[in-house]
Image: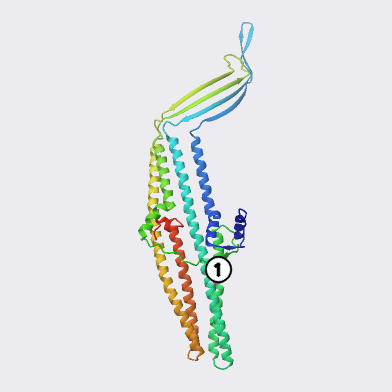
Amino acid sequence: MMFLIPFASLAILQGNAPLSLDDAVSIAVQNAFSIRQQKAVIEKNRQKIHENEGQLGPRVAISGTYTRYDKESTANFGSATIVTQPIDAKNVAASLQLPIDISGNVGRIVQASKANLVASEETLNATRNDVKLNVRRSYLNILRAEDQVGVAKLAVQEAEERLKNVKVELEQGTKAKIDVIRIEAQVAQTQSDLLTAQNQVNLSKQVLNNARGRPIETDFQTVHVDNLPAMPSVDPSTIDGAAQKVRPEAKALEKTQLALAYIRQATERGQNPSLNLAINYLRNIDAKGFSSRDESTTGTLTLNFPIFDSGVTRAQVKQARQDEESAKTQLEQVRLGISLEVRQAMTNMSNSKARLDVAKRQTASAEENYRIAKVRLAEGAGITIEITDALTQLTQARNSLVLARYDYWTAYSELQRAVGSDELQQAIGGRN
């Protein structure tokens, strides 16, 4: 069973198996360029945490020095000559540096980087929601175009059948040439509509391939969606409240605000004292001369008190506060936009549902009208223009039904994105 999943996925990617709406969304979530880019941002922010945490850890360095003088220095003590400075010196040094975060600023920067990581992860979720909506729209556009192809084929079939009958009646002398010309014009129009619909199917498939990160010409078969999703029966305010809690854009900005707060606090304490511990070891190879030691170890504790920086820190603090204010304004704007998106999606669903109900009645009426027109024409009580108009009205009604149906599906997908969840009922508290 474990081997079936990769082969099934490969078949979908190569166009050898039907591609459902859920399959298209799943592939896009893995392959979409915007999602892959955001994943790179997340990894970069994760490494930024490690970088900042490293500022609290020790640093060890080893160095070697070789010094060559023009000549050695000597000193005479009676009859003895002693070398005070050899002609060359060879030293090896090791140092340990350990910053002591007495002001807590490095810790604040670490906390800021962790908040930024969470913000980037929430941004990834927001990007996924956008990708899902784009894929669903593209997929529904394909289904819409395919249904319109079906409508156009029916119209072509009806028109061509009618043209065949009229030509027979023309030969029998019961129809005029003008009737044939009218039906021929209608056949040409229906064939043109069919070609347009077929081209739209190809274009829509290319758009979907682009959205899910696949080669543009990748072919696949669609799976029709039958049952329309139910419209949530709760009021928009309830859905809006759920969306405010779920939407990752708002969560990302909340974490960004937290990161900026840590940065501002660290900036405010930029003039605080700093403490650094250093341990140095020196090895003098082939030590010669006076006061030369083979090795030495020193320890240094440095406490630094910044006194005056010409207003640099004060300016940086003001900048940090403006960054916080900007993030706060963005969060307010996002929350207001969420409320607008929820209500727009709800309104679009309501309007498309109403149009769908009307389109169903209009289609039933147009089908009956076309049936009567054919009966009247067969009985000699009707005229050619009546059945021509009836077929045109029936085709328009069928197309209106297709549009209303997929407008409703699109509005539902927009509501999913507005709430930030594929499971609407679960997101709004399981209410029906």
- Kind of residue at badge 1: Val
Q: Is residue 80 above or below residue 153?
A: above
Q: What residue range appears in magenta? A: 197-203
Q: Residue at x 47, y 56 (%)?
A: 129
Q: Where's residue 232, x and y in %?
A: 40, 62
Quarter holding the N terminus is: bottom right
Q: Is residue 258 left or right of residue 206?
A: left
Q: How is the image coloured?
A: rainbow
Q: Residue at x 50, y 22 (%)?
A: 299
Q: Where's residue 396, x and y in %?
A: 48, 76
Q: Which residue is mark 1?
A: 201
* Displayed quadrant of residue 242: bottom left
Q: Is residue 239 left or right of residue 186?
A: left
Q: What secondary structure is the magenta-colored segment mainly? A: helix
Q: Is residue 89 left or right of residue 278?
A: right
Q: Residue at x 47, y 50 (%)?
A: 123
Q: Is residue 425 above or below residue 297?
A: below
Label 1 CA crowd tier, 10 Å (few <14, some 14–19, many 20+): many
Q: Where's residue 411, x and y in %?
A: 44, 64
Does residue 190 show up magenta in the picture? no
Q: Looking at this rendering, what residue extends furthest in the front direction?
A: 1
Number of marks = 1
Q: Looking at this rendering, what residue extends furthest in the top direction?
A: 78
Does residue 202 show up magenta in the picture? yes
Q: Where's residue 429, x and y in %?
A: 39, 55
Quarter holding the C terminus is: bottom left
> SS for tag 1?
helix
Q: Is residue 206 above or below residue 300?
A: below
